[in-house]
Image (cartoon, rainbow, N blue to C red):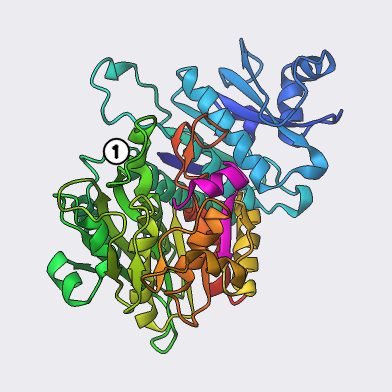
Amino acid sequence: MDVKIKKGRIEKEAAEAIVLSHFEGEESLLEETAAVDRALGGQIRGLIASGEFTGKLNQILMLHLRGGIPARRILLVGLGKKKEVGTEKIRQAMGSAGRSIREAGIKSFSTPLHGRGQNKISPSESAQSIVEGCLLGLYQFTAYRTEKRDEIKEVSQITLVDRTGGKIAEVAGGSRSGQILAEAVNFVRDLCNHPSNVVTPSRLAEEARTLAREFGLTCRVIEKNEAESLGMGAFLSVARGSLEPPKFIILEYRGGKKRDAPIVIVGKSVTFDSGGISIKPAEKMEQMKTDMSGGATVLGTMKALAQFRLPISVVGILPATENMPSGTAVKPGDVVRAMSGKTIEVINTDAEGRMILADALAYAARYKPSAIVDLATLTGACVVALGSHATGVMGTNPKLIERLKAAGEHCGERVWELPLWDVYHEQIKSDVADMKNVGGRGGGAITAAAFLRQFVGDTPWAHLDIAGTSWNDEARPYAPKGATGVGVRLLIQWLTEMSRGRA
């Protein structure tokens, strides 16, 4: 996507289309909208007065013009209530606007800085939200469409028009941030939308190596033999049923001082989850190609992190494998030894994510990190508890959890804390081993986190269960149907605040 910044008046733009906005319930028009309305002899005011356009959040109305201004079309988009406008509302509105423009077959458009100056929204924040919302909303996955490819519609250019020109550098900076974040999220969406015969553990390792070459990261891939020598029995137990070789992937970004303890982010990377011997129902099993969403998010976060050049050191870990049934697969009742030395009774082979994370978290502790955060499509129980609008968070450090919650509110990827009291650990006690890998139906998301807690030691740790937020069954303003890429913007916001010493 080509994103341009220029000084000018939106009513003077000779564009295929211009995007204008309005607040719900307000009689007065925003400055740019008012300028265009005057040039059109009050046409926009007339639409508002008649109730045809109200300014409700994400409402869209397209006007075809015959003179008055150089632009060929106007797209009106609602920002919702004026007192409630913020960066998330702008992202949503521009995601909706971008999709409508594409559906109309328009390849480029111009837009002023929506929401600028309202509720302390800076030019940079407005620009970032516009670009972020547009690029996220315009995402489409077409890699496997072979018929009628010439009918696929795309928007190739967005121009941000700043009426004052005094903040062009600030606007450009915000625009760049929005583009980096959106492209990182869309990179994750691509990985998750590809089928599992394409995105295998080996493919994830290739993607990590490519990122390392392109962005100056350090990449290491631990193969099966080395994992065995390291004692990664929990990770390898999940891989036993598959012909695909497991890959334990490590990416390092060193932007902080040498003496600074790094932050480690860990992502569940099961490239296909059949459930193993405890096989899943056939319905919607095809979506289990996205069980590597946590690992893909780690890759996307490292990509964005390197582009932002944040002064902080971060290690990304992806324990990558398939979970398949076969004559060599781990069985219910088997006992395996994790890298930490703890023994685990396998009650359900479909509780495999916590098994691979057990060894990944133990490996992460070797870095003596300042914090560990893991992301995983871990439990259906979290989907039942929170639905698809919030990621579940649990952990050992209240301050870390509050930082993640604040970052989620800022970027629009909300997280909600579930309790992790000691009493939940009673549910994962085993009669034959140190622990078992499931704790029964009650509190399933929490007992899964209680299991993971056994492998982080004293390091501040937070677990993000993204089972409900990593996939959309229906499109949303800037998140189309399918993989959402959730977690990248959340982690980058949190890491940015950490690097500034504000978190």
**What is the tally of numbered marks visible in this picture?**
1
Is residue 391 located in the magenta-colored stretch of the structure?
yes
Residue drawn at (53%, 50%) of the image: 441
Quadrant occupied by the N terminus:
top left
Q: Amino acid at mark 1?
A: His
Quadrant occupied by the C terminus:
bottom right
Q: Position of residue 202 (x, y in %)?
A: 18, 53
- Residue 445, relative to residue 29: is it above or below? below
- Residue 77, relative to residue 213: is it above or below? above
Q: Position of residue 234 (x, y in %)?
A: 29, 66
Whether residue 65 is visible to the viewer of this picture, yes or no, is yes
Q: Secondary structure at mark 1?
A: loop
Whether residue 491 is visible to the viewer of this picture, yes or no, is no
- Residue 256, relative to residue 72: is it above or below? below
Q: Which quarter of the picture shows residue 493?
A: bottom right
Residue drawn at (16%, 76%) of the image: 229
Residue identifier under label 1:
194
Q: In the shown orientation, is residue 44 left or right of residue 406?
A: right
Q: Nearer the viewer, residue 484 or 455?
A: 455
Q: Residue furthest top?
A: 66
Q: Position of residue 252 (x, y in %)?
A: 32, 71
Residue drawn at (40%, 27%) of the image: 154
Q: In the shown orientation, is residue 349 left or right of residue 450?
A: left
Q: Which quarter of the picture shows residue 88?
A: top right
